Image (cartoon, helix red, strand yellow):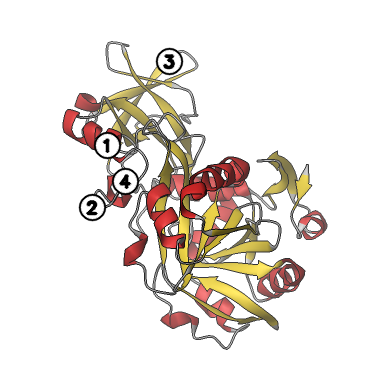
Amino acid sequence: MRKTSLYQSHRTLGAKMVPFAGFEMPVQYTGVVREHLAVRHQVGLFDVSHMGEFLVSGSQAINLIQYVFSNDVSRLDIGQAQYGYMPNAKGGIIDDLLVYRIDNQSYLLVVNAANIEKDWNWLVTHNKVFSASLQNQSDQWSLLALQGPRATSVLAKLTDTDIGRIPFYRFDYGKVAGIDQVLISATGYTGSGGYELYIPNEGAEKIWNSLIQNGAEPCGLAARNTLRIEMGYCLYGNDIDYTTSPLSAGLSWCTAFSKEFVSKEIIEQQKVVGIAKKRVGFVLNERGIPRQGYALTDDSGNDIGIVTSGTQSPSLEKGIGMGYINREQAVVGNTIYVVIRNKQISATITSLPFYHAE
């Protein structure tokens, strides 16, 4: 089992450690609800150094990325990030990821930890046509996510970079807690604002400790999961995978049909013909917690879909979930049922996100 550069720090803080994507990671410190609400109302700090980083550079970098990535990176300014996915040859999803434009000919791809090897091999295979320069830098970087409404005030104490002027999905480089060349990105997976900090491994512990000393609450992967579910964000392996149509998943907004990319024709055909299933969010009308794999039914008990993510929402204090159901029944306001311990629990389809900042 691999460990991040902050493994010992997590043990010292009393974190509960669990295996995740081949790494031993902190799932919680003081408790999921406390950590979740710290991010919603104050500021929380996550170690997400298990994520993968690929540097793609050279004159052919943009052409390679344009072909393997769903979104249009030609629209990126230097210092800007973009969300999208890598489609596979059958119109499914290899991974969802962020692309950062570092300079005129360099891009940083940030991929899910469980998919590092698969994504790298896919890039290498397609690069035979393009011959861009590829570097797998996953072992060189630590990644911290400082999230919540107080993130700017806490980070500002540790850097001279004017972070308040970094717009959403933009980034800059700066010194943080005396550590040079930190990539400071106004991105996150929680819906509460904040920053993701890409740090050379040797500087991660100093920045981690400095942020906690200045008021950030250490948070584990369990709170990261409840936060992203409240926002309706997809998790690879739960809500999207190799077989998922990106249109069913609601990812047409980051699919640039104006350019060529892997499986464009297949996904365009799905657009014309229509999708059979659609990802929806739902809120339980009774007590209960929906879990991945639970059946979704209509009022007669007929199967209409399956839960892909679910939790008890700390913000809403209700059971919430996402899943795929038959397209014709995927209407906001409709009543569906989650089968929990052989009992049908009523739920209402709702628009995403579930949570809206006050």
State the CA–CA distance, disc 2 to disc 4. 27 Å
Q: Nearer the viewer, mark 3 or mark 1?
A: 1
Where on the picture, by quarter, is residue 143? bottom right
Residue identified by numbered label 4: 352
Identity, as a three-letter code, of the amino acid under mark 3: Lys
Query: What percent of the width, then of the height, locates residue 256?
Result: 28, 51
On screen, residue 284 versus residue 32, left or right, reads left
Q: Earlier in the sequence, mark 2 or mark 4?
A: 2
- Residue at figure coordinates x 30%, y 48% from the top left: 260
Q: Residues within 10 Å of mark 3 (few under 14, many from 20)?
A: few
Sort mark 2 into few (<14), some (14-19) or many (20+) by Cα contacts within 10 Å: few
Q: Residues within 10 Å of mark 1 (few under 14, many from 20)?
A: some
Residue occupied by mark 3: 343
Query: Which label is found at residue 165?
Result: none
Residue under the point 47% across and 51% down: 97
Residue pointed to by mark 2: 258
Q: Would residue 256 appear left or right of 226 to someone viewing this image? A: left
Q: Please say if 237 is above or below 177.
A: above
Screen quadrant of the C terminus? bottom left
Q: CA distance from mark 1 to mark 4?
A: 28 Å
Amino acid type at mark 4: Leu
Q: Earlier in the sequence, mark 3 or mark 4?
A: 3
Q: Is residue 213 visible?
A: yes
From the top left corner, tell me how far across and down residue 305 is, in percent. 35, 22
Report the residue marked by disc 1.
265
- Identify the element where label 1 is drawn: helix
CA gap, disc 2 and disc 3: 47 Å
In the image, which is nearer the foreground, mark 1 or mark 4?
A: 1
Amino acid identity at mark 1 = Glu
Q: Nearer the viewer, residue 136 or 93?
A: 136
